[in-house]
Amino acid sequence: MITLIRTAILSLIALTAAGCTIPLREARDEAPPPASDPLDARLLRCSALGPKAAADDADCQGAWAEARQRIQPPLMGK
């Protein structure tokens, strides 16, 4: 009986370890869904530019500022 319990526990540990090595999502080669909002379209364009090119792009800087304001509006007193 103890051998059966040990085997079951070891099997669960082995399955858990194997499950952790399998990627949860596969890399997607398809394009992102079309943007429903003009800000989304601007942010997608900035994402496609890459971090270095987008950091120097004035439109990307404006889009990021607008996105920050949507997430965290400015305080009322300031």
Image: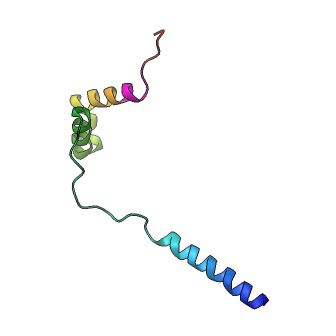
Q: Nearer the viewer, residue 13 or 59?
A: 13
Residue depicted at x 45% and y 71%: 22
- Find residue 52 and report its image quarter: top left
- Find residue 30 and report its image quarter: bottom left
The single residue placed furthest to the top in the displayed view is: 77
Residue depicted at x 41% and y 30%: 71
Is residue 60 highlighted in magenta?
Answer: no
Q: Main secondary structure of the magenta part?
A: helix
Query: In the rendered view, does 15 fall on the left or right side of 45?
Result: right
Is residue 69 highlighted in magenta?
Answer: yes
Q: Which residues are magenta?
A: 68-73
Q: Nearer the viewer, residue 53 or 43?
A: 43
Residue 73: image x %, image y %?
A: 42, 22
Where 37 falls versus 73 (above or below)?
Answer: below
Residue 9: image x %, image y %?
A: 68, 80
Where 73 falls versus 67 (above or below)?
Answer: above
Q: Nearer the viewer, residue 45 or 33?
A: 33
The single residue placed furthest to the right in the displayed view is: 2
- Find residue 72 and report its image quarter: top left
Colour setting:
rainbow
The quarter of the picture where the C terminus appears is top left
Residue depicted at x 48% and y 9%: 77
Residue depicted at x 22% and y 28%: 58
Residue 12: image x %, image y %?
A: 62, 78
Q: Total label count?
A: 0
The quarter of the picture where the N terminus appears is bottom right
